[in-house]
Amino acid sequence: MKNNDNRVIFHIDVNSAYLSWTAVHMLQQGSTLDIREIPSIVGGDPVTRHGIVLAKSIPAKKFKIQTGETVYRALEKCPELYIVPPKYDLYMKCSNAMVEIFKEYTPTIQRFSVDECFLDFTNMEHLYPDYIELANTIKNRIRDELGFTVSIGISNNKLLAKVASDIKKPDAVITLFPIEIKDKMWPLPVEDLFMVGRATLPKLHNLNIFTIGDLANCDLKLLKEKLKSHGQMIWNYANGIEFSDVRKSNHIDMKGIGNSTTIPFDVTRRDEAHKVILSLCETVGMRLRDSGNCCSLVSVHIRTNEFFNQGRQRKVYFYTDSTKKIAQLACELFDEIWKGEPLRHIGVRVSELCTNEFCQLTLFEEKDNAKNSALDKAVDSIRLRFGSKSVIRCTFLNSGIRPLTGGVQEDDYQLMSSIL
């Protein structure tokens, strides 16, 4: 078993990332309105007011607006709510700018998500004798140079560092070493613990477990009986036991990437639906390539105007990050499940990812993939530099369908290094 005693790990989390990044961009473009200071959200369509809430401002929290709820429901709570659409190319620019600052301090950086990173400062005490001072230096540089704030958690493992960064927000530095677990972590609600989700929470409540401390002091044999191996894992987490490494990599470690959209009109023609799917795949493909991953599983989800849901997925025999390939597969899946009903919601998701550093192609895919890859890289580069609308496919001209669509962030990130 590894010894964590001498490790120093930071978890850096952007405060209200999507909303903060959008606010900074608006101010840089000359806006006099800081949407962080008013009830505002990122998500959906500001004109049709469809979609879901991806991020909310602190003033919006006073109206009990929740991330993931519909924009329609949020507007019922706050009719004056200010709505801005998501801009994933902007988010990646901001994320990359933040990582460039991190690189000045340590080479060991793991991008846990677009707005979270782990940094390892183990055995660097000769350079940074005071890690609290170091964390404040990094935090203040991000605020002063990039215009948004972060919270930094410090511990001797990734789990505790991540929990620490959530304890105090915004613009904060907090430690959570093993000696501090009892006072700082155990009083927190058990649902604040990583890997305690909606399915696990009621099971824990049935066992009279309501705080992380309750879980940490629960009979492990009982937990394993009720929750199997998951019980052992969350009991370890509640006791601060976690040994995964901060893995230096150029890709964001995740399980999947997805986008979906609620369409403001009934889609009744197959060619219209295919264009919506292609517009979703444009965004999915860009994010997949920017994360440094390829996928081998594509899934499609549809919802009719009668709220009937259906989905299908397909495993393919090669890994790809090609927008064209993903869209082709997604359209094939759509054709298999659609019976001609009017549609209001379509989603596309890719998963079973692997890093493109070691991606193995088949003999038949290699030639096509090289062409598609060169084209995708060129288009991505232009869009990142000049905006998402700078290059669009001609199929979208006069179609009434946006060339890049999507308002749902569905990245699923993994903490443990044993999960690839």
Image: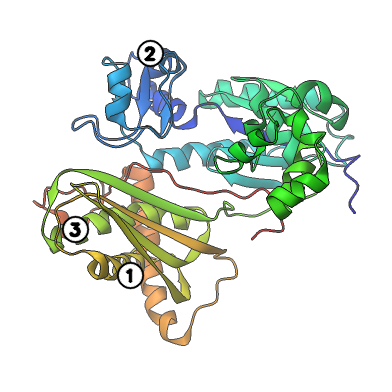
Q: Residue at x 82, y 40 (%)?
A: 219
Instruction: Return the x and y of residue 293 as percentages of the image width and height.
Output: 52, 60
Front-most of residues 226 and 310 = 226
Q: Which mark is residue 329?
A: 1
Instruction: Return the x and y of residue 185 as percentages of the image width and height.
Output: 75, 26
- Please state which amino acid type lies under the numbered disc 1: Leu
- Disc 3 secondary structure class: helix
Front-most of residues 393 and 40 = 40
Seen from this angle, which residue lies furthest left? 398
**Is 20 situated left or right of 275 in this image?**
right
Q: Which mark is residue 38?
A: 2
Above or below residue 59? Residue 287 is: below
Q: Are marks 2 and 1 in contact (CB under 8 Å)?
A: no
* Structural distance between the alpha carbons of marks 2 and 3: 37 Å
Seen from this angle, which residue lies furthest front? 206
Q: Quadrant of residue 211?
A: top right
Above or below residue 82? Residue 191 is: below
**Is 401 situated left or right of 38 in this image?**
left
- Disc 2 secondary structure class: loop
Q: Which mark is residue 273?
A: 3
